[in-house]
Amino acid sequence: MATIITLDIFSGCPNPQWVLSPKQESELEERMNSVTERTDSPPGGIFSGLGYRGVSVQRAESLGKGGFEMFLGGGILDPGPKSANLKDRGGELETWLVNTAGSVLLPDLMDHIHQRREKFTDILKDHLDMVQAGCPKCVAADAPAYDPAYWNNPQHQPYNNCYNYANNQRTDTFAQPGRATGKPITALSCQGVTPSAESDGLAACGDFSTPLSRGWYVALVIWPGNDYHWYRQDDCGCWSHKPGQTAACNTDNSGQPIVDPKSADRGPYTDFCTYMVTNNGVTIK
Amino acid sequence: MVTATVSIDLFSGRSNPVWHLASAQVVALLRRLGDLVVAGRHASFPEGMGYRGIDVVLFDSDADTETMVRICRGWVVLNGRTLLDSDRALELWLLRSCPADQQGEWCKEVVERIEAGHVG
């Protein structure tokens, strides 16, 4: 009855595996008995991508004892499709399991895991914040999913701005309204930017409540005389953005989920211009 | 010879302001950096919309090496070390080095906010 622990961490190489000692198996059972609080949240690791994603536990069925398989990541225990997920408070069980690796894991790898686990906790918190924020219903057929990993990497993050992000087009040109259609911005004001966006194919609208069979909603705001900024509504109903060369995110300047860019903390971008509709056919560069 | 390129991490839609320091300014910058003391804790830089800090790229053409410096909120991160920019003197000096053709309302606003004690 071996209990096999597998670290979900590598992409090309086989993931590290080790077997628990009989004493560790007994302790695992005790620890699992204390994890009872149900949750609807998925394990944090499934959000993550490359690097440490979590740890899986497999025990084959043998002499009177049932087998099981479970996955832990970001403070959540997923016991499989037949049971509800459980909260691993403070990630105690996950930490204990990772530490049973002993010398199987090099110290560098251990450091990486600790850093990633802290990040998972943040991602999970963001996810829960969005659920609790009461995002409005998204009625746009093509609204993109919030997928920051698509934007937040060294190859693309510095070369795409808020206009790229709002239009969901990663051109790597730091796109400017009107540049693709020969109608550049005339002033850093609502009147100076809106016609350039319309020239690219965006259309102004009064709000974001009208169902769209094509496209999705974006919003234009202005830092008077200095700059412009765009938000987009994601399919979850809340809004996200990419401030210049910085990472795409779904919170405002106060760290709050963006339920409506009109009422969000926008820092110095004090002028709200308009909501607009964009679509996959819009040309930007 | 060392050259210095300054960029202000500031805008969202437009490209950030970027300029090169004159030779005398580079000498002054290196002296100022050399005078900074090591901070006791890690730097924390602002995020989000508006002013987020200053990046300086120092290029030594003799050694063919590049050094990145990040400056904001009284912190300077240089070669992985965090240094203290007391009274944000270096940060203000760099902002004021912005040439006239790069300046806009932003420069005055950012300097005024720092002088008024705002953190970002």
Image (cartoon, coloured by chain):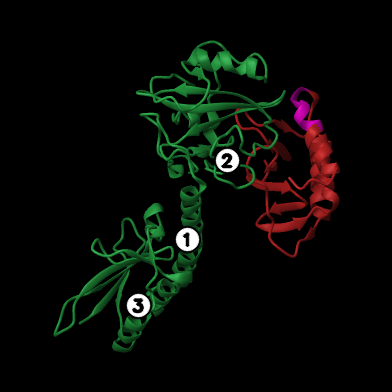
* Chain that is red in the image: B
**What x and y, as percent, mark residue A41?**
39, 58
Instruction: Report how far apart the C-alphas of labels 1 and 3 lie in the structure.
Output: 23 Å
Both on one chain, marks 3 and 2?
yes
- In terms of sequence position, does the residue under pointer 1 or pointer 3 come before the other? 3
| Number of the label disc, if any, that sits on residue A32 | 3
- Which chain is home to disc 2? A
**What x and y, as percent, mark residue A180?**
49, 16
- Which chain is home to disc 1? A
The three-letter amino acid code for the residue at tag 1 is Arg
Instruction: Report how far apart the C-alphas of labels 3 and 2 lie in the structure.
Output: 41 Å
Residue located beneath label 2 in the image: A246
Residue located beneath label 1 in the image: A116
* Chain that is green in the image: A
Residue at position x 47%, y 53% from top?
A: A128
Q: Is residue A251 above or below residue A202?
A: below
Please state which of residues A224 and B38 is positioned toward the viewer in this rendering: A224
Q: Is residue B75 left or right of residue A19?
A: right
